[in-house]
Image (cartoon, grey):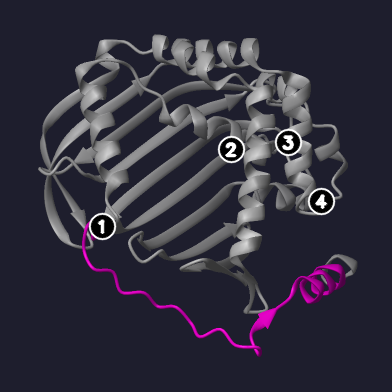
């Protein structure tokens, strides 16, 4: 559980910035890209960890190997004008790979259930209910963490030389070679430590711990470690050493590709614990503003499940 929670807490550090001209230009590119109504985006997350295996048994080493390389790939096509979306998710955890898809057709959402290749339909009314619940949860999260104050503190950590407008470079994409302007990002250990300190000073720790437990509980986890989750212990167990990143923007001020790598190490490298880790996040944007071709299956009574049928399948799976 701690290894998964580390990922969730750290990825947020990759999206901060400063008020230099370089970052202001980068932020404008982010806004421009976000306003485009059609396109495709590929998100790849690669978590690489090394553990202290000294003195461990073969079985213990085998258990740890599951966490050495965790990969997630999300490819999404969208057309906001037609309210269409096709998202494919592929997740590799140890020797296990899980893939699933999500389809949005106007006001109805279809979720592919992994392994059994069936779908669950979520109607417009159910989507509205989920949106209302999400707003309530968001309000609770804001109580747990004052994001406005925290972001202001994070911005103050960055200096002019953290974001650099580089030379024109070429990036290979599915559409071919594209000329771009490169923005480079860097945070050192001291700056990351300040971010971590700011996080702990503004975080309502008890509320945050409960929020994590609730989220993990939604997946039906019976792992006792989940219910003992403590954010202070988690952050005390690791040290973030540095972050490097690059963003490539084309001549239309649109993001083409951006990537970040966060490096860290464990503070207590006893046998079985993390020695070092890297979290790499890459986002590639293609076909922005183009007509998008979707590959959406036909949904029928034969491949659709209702909530009761889905619960029965999950219960059978958990019991096995």
Magenta run includes residue 274: no
Mark number, residue 221: 4
Q: Of helix, strand and loop, which one carries label 4?
A: loop
Magenta run includes residue 302: yes
| Circle 2 residue | 7
Name the foreground residue: 59 vs 276: 276
Q: Of helix, strand and loop, which one carries label 2?
A: helix
Residues under numbered marks 3 and 4 in contact, where contact means CB atoms less than 8 Å apart: no
In the image, what residue occupies the spot 76% across and 28% down? 209
Residues under numbered marks 1 and 4 in contact, where contact means CB atoms less than 8 Å apart: no
| Circle 3 residue | 212
In the image, what residue occupies the spot 74% across and 75% down? 306
Q: Where is residue 87 in the image (x, y as percent from the top left)?
A: 46, 64
For the residues labelled 3 and 4, the Cα–Cα distance comes to 12 Å
Magenta segment's dominant SS is loop
| Circle 1 residue | 286
Viewer can see residue 99: yes
Q: Is residue 252 above or below residue 194?
A: below
Left or right: 256, with 212 as reference point: left
Mark 3 vs mark 4: which is more N-terminal?
3
Mark 3 vs mark 1: which is more N-terminal?
3
Mark 4 vs mark 2: which is more N-terminal?
2
In the image, what residue occupies the spot 24% across and 32% down? 28
- Quarter holding the C terminus is bottom right
Left or right: 32, with 209 as reference point: left
């Amino acid at each position: 559980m701690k290894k998964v929670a580390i990922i969730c807490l750290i990825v947020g550090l990759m999206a901060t910035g400063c008020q230099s001209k370089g970052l202001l230009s980068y932020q404008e590119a982010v806004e421009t890209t976000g306003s485009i109504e059609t396109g495709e985006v590929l998100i790849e997350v690669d978590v690489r960890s090394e553990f202290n295996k000294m003195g461990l048994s073969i079985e213990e080493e085998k258990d740890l190997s599951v966490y050495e390389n965790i990969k997630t790939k999300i490819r999404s096509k969208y057309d906001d004008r037609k309210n269409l979306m096709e998202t494919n998710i592929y997740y590799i955890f140890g020797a296990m790979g899980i893939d699933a898809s999500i389809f949005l057709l106007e006001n109805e959402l279809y979720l592919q259930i992994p392994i059994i290749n069936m779908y669950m339909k979520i109607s417009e009314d159910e989507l509205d209910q989920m949106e209302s619940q999400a707003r309530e949860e968001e309000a609770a999260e804001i109580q747990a963490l004052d994001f406005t104050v925290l972001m202001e503190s994070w911005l103050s950590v960055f200096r002019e030389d953290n974001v650099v407008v580089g030379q024109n470079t070429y990036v290979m994409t599915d559409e071919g070679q594209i000329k771009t302007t490169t923005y480079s990002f860097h945070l050192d250990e001291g700056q990351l430590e300040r971010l971590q300190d700011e996080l702990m000073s503004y975080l309502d720790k008890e509320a945050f711990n409960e929020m994590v437990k609730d989220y993990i509980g939604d997946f039906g986890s019976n792992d006792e470690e989940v219910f003992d989750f403590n954010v202070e212990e988690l952050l005390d167990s690791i040290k973030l050493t540095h972050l490097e990143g690059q963003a490539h923007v084309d001549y239309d001020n649109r993001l083409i590709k951006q990537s970040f790598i966060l490096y860290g190490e464990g503070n207590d490298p006893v046998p079985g614990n993390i020695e070092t880790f890297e979290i790499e996040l890459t986002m590639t944007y293609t076909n922005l503003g183009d007509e998008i071709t979707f590959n959406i299956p036909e949904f029928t009574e034969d491949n659709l499940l209702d909530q009761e049928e889905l619960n029965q399948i999950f219960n059978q799976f958990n019991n096995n």
